[in-house]
Image (cartoon, rainbow, N blue to C red):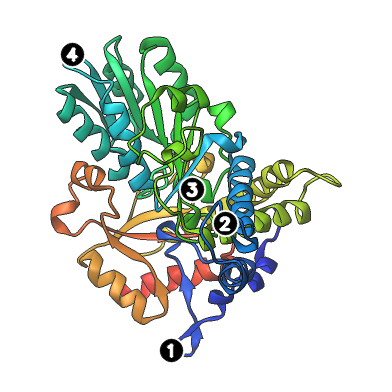
């Protein structure tokens, strides 16, 4: 297992102290910290190249170059083509945006499949699209004992009437990784007319997403969960994006990907995104990539190293959690099944409201989330929403075993 702790020095925020001790940023599922190179790339753009696009002058041409490179960087991350990547303010907005176009293709008798494991960003756009078109919504359940997707329920939801199938690649609430390639295969087999829409926002921080291998039609990712600035990215297969009619202003380009990129984009954020992907490539070149790799090969190597390191962190947390009185972990807790989860944990301390637990940890310099984190259907399904949801503790590759131990120690003190 590679030791990635040396990378912490690249992240200025990780030097922050709280109460005389280093803060523990266990809030990574809500947004990661960023390397210094990302901060500098954004500041540099604003200092010297800030302009709108397609002008006949230097700073505008530099902005055009930033936009072009941002699409190439996203394509390298996802193993896509640059014109198959759409930028926007966030994944939620992009999914709502494309759902309007897809809703125009739906009608009475059509069916839309959504799951109770998903963030609401990959539920509500399709529920509302179905309502607008008079289509039917079919729900996929979860297995309560380990909070994984119920594959039998998934198969039962599919039919020749299915037109959209939306599911997450990993739960932002409990860390469950879905068998996505198998779900895509089942959809193609049982619902050949359906578009497959995947929420890759949570998984992208922890695993390489190869859209070619996955075979989905649309995949959403948020750069601010992947060590970059606040942006959204939507991959779409070219033939799907060309077939859909975008909602756009008349002067906007008709070619991909710009026909779906409405208005002026976040150019400084795109500059930061290029730097974030560059950081990942550096990680890969330092930890396992062959000599002289392409950026795509280096990114793949980075995520192999990240997965190995994070698996150790997850094992450490799950083992230690067993010793904390009254602590319940929701989701996969079997150490033999770490490949099926990310190091994101939904927990509750017996006798404590999640908001109280999160506040107490925050006072001790451990930053975590509480509530439903927009995985509203899941919290309702588990019977937790009415009493405050859960506490979410999330680790990523810049965390250390010592930080995991500190979180566990503080939980034990609260217990």
Q: Nearer the viewer, mark 1 or mark 4?
A: 4
Q: Nearer the viewer, mark 2 or mark 1?
A: 2
Q: Which residue is mark 2?
A: 273
Q: Nearer the viewer, mark 3 or mark 2?
A: 2
Location of residue 81 in the rendering, given as x and y in whole percent from the top left corner: 61, 34
Pick whichever of labels 1 and 4 is earlier in the sequence.
Answer: 1
Location of residue 6 in the rendering, given as x and y in whole percent from the top left corner: 70, 68
Pick whichever of labels 2 and 1 is earlier in the sequence.
Answer: 1
- Taking depth in this image into account, of 370 and 122 the one nearest to the observer is 122
The residue at the far bottom in this view is 20
Alpha-carbon neighbours of circle 4 within 10 Å: few (<14), some, or many (≥20)?
few
Per the image, label 1 sits on a secondary structure element best described as loop
Pick whichever of labels 2 and 4 is earlier in the sequence.
Answer: 4
**Number of marks in the rendered image:** 4
Q: Which residue is mark 3?
A: 342
Q: Which residue is mark 1?
A: 19
Q: Nearer the viewer, mark 4 or mark 3?
A: 4
The residue at the far front in this view is 56
Image quarter (top left, top right, bottom left or bottom right) of the C terminus: bottom left
Query: Do labels 3 and 2 touch, CB within 8 Å?
Result: no
């Amino acid at each position: 297992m590679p030791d990635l702790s040396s990378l912490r020095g690249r992240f200025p925020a990780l030097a922050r102290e709280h109460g005389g001790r280093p803060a523990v940023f266990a809030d990574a599922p809500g947004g990661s910290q960023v390397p210094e190179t990302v901060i500098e790339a954004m500041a540099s753009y604003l200092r010297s190249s800030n302009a709108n696009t397609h002008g006949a002058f230097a700073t505008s041409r530099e902005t055009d170059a930033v936009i072009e490179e941002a699409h190439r960087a996203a394509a390298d991350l996802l193993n896509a083509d640059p014109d198959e990547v759409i930028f926007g303010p966030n994944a939620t907005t992009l999914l709502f945006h494309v759902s309007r176009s897809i809703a125009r293709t739906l009608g009475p008798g059509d069916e839309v499949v959504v799951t109770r494991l998903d963030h609401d960003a990959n539920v509500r756009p399709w529920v509302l699209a179905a309502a607008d078109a008079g289509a039917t919504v079919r729900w996929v359940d979860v297995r309560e004992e380990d909070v994984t997707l119920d594959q039998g329920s998934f198969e039962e939801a599919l039919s020749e009437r299915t037109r959209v199938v939306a599911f997450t690649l990993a739960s932002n609430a409990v860390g469950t990784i879905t068998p996505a390639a198998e779900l895509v295969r089942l959809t193609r087999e049982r619902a050949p007319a359906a578009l497959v829409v995947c929420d890759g926002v949570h998984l992208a921080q922890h695993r390489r997403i190869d859209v070619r291998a996955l075979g989905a039609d649309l995949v959403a990712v948020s750069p601010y969960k992947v060590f970059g600035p606040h942006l959204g990215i939507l991959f779409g297969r070219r033939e799907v994006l060309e077939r859909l009619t975008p909602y756009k202003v008349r002067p906007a380009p008709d070619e991909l990907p710009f026909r779906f990129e409405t208005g002026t984009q976040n150019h400084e954020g795109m500059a930061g995104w290029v730097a974030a992907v560059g950081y990942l490539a550096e990680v890969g070149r330092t930890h396992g990539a062959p000599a002289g790799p392409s950026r795509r090969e280096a990114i793949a190597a980075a995520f192999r190293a990240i997965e190995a390191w994070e698996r150790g962190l997850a094992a450490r947390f799950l083992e230690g959690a067993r010793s904390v009185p009254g602590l319940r972990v929701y989701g996969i807790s079997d150490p033999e099944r770490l490949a099926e989860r990310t190091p994101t944990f939904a927990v509750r301390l017996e006798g404590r409201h999640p908001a109280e637990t999160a506040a107490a940890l925050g006072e001790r310099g451990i930053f975590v989330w509480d509530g439903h984190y927009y995985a509203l259907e899941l919290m309702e399904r588990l019977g937790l929403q009415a009493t405050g949801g859960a506490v979410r503790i999330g680790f990523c590759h810049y965390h250390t075993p010592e930080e995991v131990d500190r979180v566990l120690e503080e939980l034990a003190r609260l217990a």
